[in-house]
Amino acid sequence: HEALRTTFIDVPLYGTGQEMSRALIAPQGLVPLDVADLRGQPDALRQADRLAYAHRTEPFDLAGGPLWRALLISEADDIHQLLLTQHHLITDAWSMVRLVKELIEFYHAPSLPAQVPQAVPDYSDYVYSQRNNLQARQHQQHLSWWQEKLRDLPRLVLPIASNTLSPGHHGDAVRINISQTLTEQVRRFSQQNGCTVFVTLLSAWVCTLYRYSGQGDFGIGTLSAGRENSDFDEVQGFFVNILVLRAGITGDMNFAGLVSAMNQELLESLRR
């Protein structure tokens, strides 16, 4: 996979005094497997947690590479953890799933093939296709659509004390458990309304923001896989695209109507 052999260097933009990043693809790539043998140690679990934290938080050298690393932690004779950490420049969740799948296949294979098959096309083919799209007439049409779609988009104002917040890039998460009964109800509702479970939950989140802000018009961000072309399904790399969906709640709209509107909003956005 090209992405796993890629590093990034800064090169000058002549005449501007600025720099740009350029990708370098090595002909071969080798990632060492670090091993931590904690078997027989009384605090093996605590040490494993500490090693895992250090493994995933250690910065990468973008120019020197590699941009991913592997660590095998042995806690007992029958308890082992394989940790894979990758820089987001070369991967996304889809790619990680595919990589783990390939590793499992090799692990269970009676013998490794003489040569690992290369993904065709590769990530560079995707980059070239995106560059061609930027030069196509359709790109300008899509750009105009987004500019019109997000024109005069109000900022979402939530009733929170601004003096308790400080700008930053670290988010947080609130995790909740949904009962099996409610899960089945959500699935049934989604099927009856011709949408996915994601759209139903997205609409519920829009309702929550509307309830706390009193605003019916605001933007909400989500992610798309960015793999509209199935030829790239097996390719390692960062494909994720950010979509801004515009909520439009009116006073006479019920929840089913909101779900229908958000479903249409999502489908139109994915096409562009």
Image (cartoon, rainbow, N blue to C red):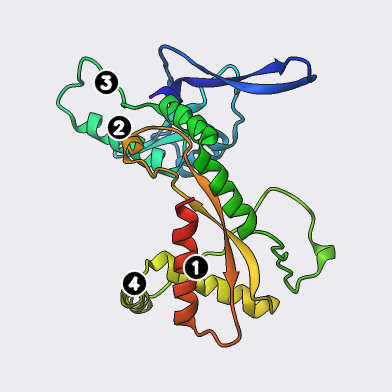
Q: CA distance from mark 4 to mark 3?
A: 42 Å
Q: Position of residue 152 (x, y in %)?
A: 72, 62
Residue mark closest to the camera, 1 vs 4: 4
**Residue at far right of view:** 163
Of the numbered discs 2 and 3, the one sitting upstream in the chain is 2
Q: Which of the two discs, 2 and 3, sits closer to the camera?
A: 3
Circle nearer the N terminus (1, 4): 4
Q: Tell me which amino acid carries mark 3.
A: Val
Location of residue 57 by image quarter: top right
**Residue under circle 2?**
103
Mark in the foreground, 4 or 3: 4
Name the residue carrying label 3: 116
* Of marks 1 and 3, the one in the foreground: 1
Q: Which residue is mark 1?
A: 202
Visible residue check, residue 88: no
Badge 1 vs badge 3, beta-carbon distance below 8 Å: no
Callout 2 secondary element: helix
Q: Which residue is mark 4?
A: 194
